[in-house]
Image (cartoon, helix red, strand yellow):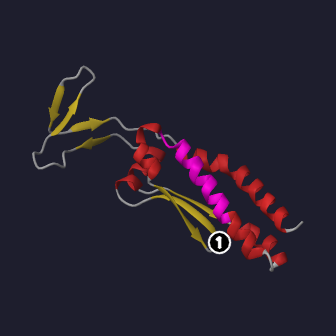
Amino acid sequence: MSVHVNVNTQKLQSFIQKDKATAPQVLAEWQQGGSQELLMQLRNNTPYKYGNLREAANKRFTPKGFTIFFTAGKYSSIAGFLEKGTKPHMIFPSNPAGVLSWTDKSGIQRFAKHVKHPGFSGRFFVQKTRDQARPVLRELYRQIWEKWHR
């Protein structure tokens, strides 16, 4: 399960095309500034406990906008589970010893062949980022457009 935030400028394309001379520059500047803003907000909203996940956030430009995503590997799936949550499930060891090991709250080392995870409702930090970024990205586009059309 991975998490992506796709920002598509399709609705803006008809507006941009009214001035074909500056359209590529306006779009490029908006992609650069908008993706940087969204990336910063996503990193700020990522749960603090998962600092490595914050650093795994990345951006990619697309022909119609940009995508913010978590790089492949374990961070991609962790982001999906943190965002959307999980149902109750069993956890089994993946190590060669065939045993799970952890230290409980009192500092005692515990071992088990398996454990039942109660599930997790999700943090929805990507959704929060998307909702926060929407007005910021619109305002950024307006500012760039005005700069190019003074």
Residue closest to the eye, 102 or 93? 102
Residue at the outermost left position: 97
SS of the residue at dot 1?
Answer: loop
- Amino acid type at mark 1: Lys
Give coordinates of residue 7: x percent, y percent. 63, 62
Q: Quadrant of the N terminus?
A: bottom left
**Which residue: 61% across, 59% down?**
35
Please indicate whether residue 125 sits to the left or right of residue 97 in the image: right
Give coordinates of residue 119: x percent, y percent. 37, 38
Does the magenta-highlighted stretch encompass residue 117?
Answer: no
**Which residue: 16% across, 48% down?**
95
Quadrant of res 74: bottom left
Give coordinates of residue 23: x percent, y percent. 77, 75
Q: Quadrant of the C terminus?
A: bottom right
Which range is magenta? Answer: 31-47
Give coordinates of residue 67: x percent, y percent. 56, 63
> Is 20 rendered above or below residue 122?
below
Density class for disc 1 (Cα within 10 Å; few <14, some 14-19, many ≥20) is: some
Q: Which residue is mark 1?
A: 64
Quadrant of res 62: bottom right
Please indicate whether residue 130 sits to the left or right of residue 138 in the image: left
